[in-house]
Amino acid sequence: MAKKLSVVVSVYNEELGIDQFYQHTSSILKETSDKTGWDYELIFVNDGSRDNSLEFLRKYAANDDKVAVINFAANRGHEAAMIAGIDYSTGDGVVCMDADLQHPPESIPGIIAKFDEGFDVVSMIRTARADAGIFKRITSAAFYKVMNALSGKTKFENNSSDFFAISRRVASVLKNDYRERVRFLRGYVQNVGFKKTTLEFEASARVAGESNYNLKALIKLSLNAICNFSDVPLKMGIYAGVVSIIAALILMIYSIVQFFLGTAPDGYSTLIVVLCFMFGVLFIILGFISEYLAIIFAEVKQRPIYIVDSIITSKGEELK
Ligand code: UDP
Ligand code: MG
């Protein structure tokens, strides 16, 4: 039987560029299907768009029997959308990509070739990003440095992206066993094991519209990722405590000696500096503990990762 590729595309307010994405990607998928014999399905996940994206997607599903749409009841974020697409997909391989053509569909034949060679995970590595300034580049590099330093045995590919491909086996693992509310999907993809390879791609500029990831969202993603893969920040308190005790002992001995020499200094400034420093350390540690507590809280609540409003099947039927 012919193999099938599921292409999962998360869509949030993409009305300006979605047509171009759909036309371009479909034509490449058709061509690739003729060449490789891999059938395909195109799964759009509408992540609570507030513009007309859903109308565009409805139209595609009605006219194209390769297209299905999962329509969220509310915005749940890019990762939740990818997870929903993976859950729903039925292909032998699944590719997750953005709807703004920053992830070139031209890479798809290469991905299929890797699947045919027997790979289970294909991480797509960005070699250039047309729209990223120096700030984004530096922070992104720093993020991966910190991640790799803190996460012990698990290692993360530099410049990996939300553009990746996984086999059915990996998709099943994600569907059944990685159901965390606070998560770092591309980290999971890289660390589930199986036969893994990388391909490179050049990220072009967005076709239309604006990026939805602002600085705040990026900080949140990074913090979640670190707390998800590492417990080093949680143990920071122990190291900070040991260092403070040693410093305190040294200061104590120094003060006693000064007292007997009759030259005990006026301690106001020293006190203030030490106090501020200690409280600073204490609050940072407390902040990290709260961060883990918040993660535990989110997991314990067991709320769903996403809520589906309707599904539009490849036959164009809308199921509520
Ligand atoms: N996206 C989404 N939900 C969100 C934000 C973004 O599904 O809450 C989608 C968006 O439509 C796009 C992809 O995730 O397909 C990447 O988003 P964006 O291009 O804004 O991020 P960037 O490429 O700048 O990192
Ligand atoms: Mg983008």
Image (cartoon, helix red, strand yellow):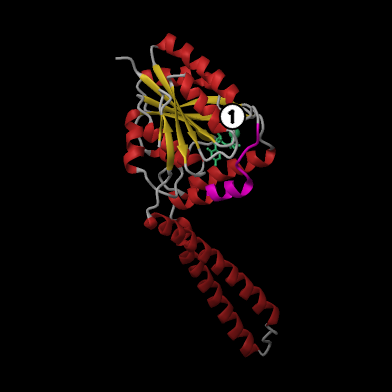
Q: Which residues are magenta?
A: 209-222
At a point 64% along the width and 40% down the height, the residue shown is 136
Give coordinates of residue 304: x percent, y percent.
Answer: 40, 48
Q: Identify the amino acid type marked 1.
A: Asp
Name above or below for residue 53 compared with residue 281.
Answer: above
Q: Quadrant location of the N terminus?
A: top left
Residue 210 placement, left or right of 57:
right
At a point 59% along the width and 44% down the height, the residue shown is 142
Name above or below for residue 191 compared with residue 39.
Answer: below
Q: Quadrant location of the C terminus?
A: top left
Point out the quarter of the image occupied by ligand 2. top right
Give coordinates of residue 197: x percent, y percent.
Answer: 43, 27
> Between 147 and 224, which is closer to the camera in this rendering?
224
Question: Magenta span has 158?
Answer: no
Residue designated by label 1: 100
At a point 65% along the width and 79% down the height, the residue shown is 271
At a point 47% along the width and 36% down the height, the residue shown is 71
Label 1 environment density (alpha carbons within 10 Å; few <14, some 14–19, many ≥20) = many
Give coordinates of residue 173: x percent, y percent.
Answer: 33, 37
Name above or below for residue 29 compared with residue 257.
Answer: above
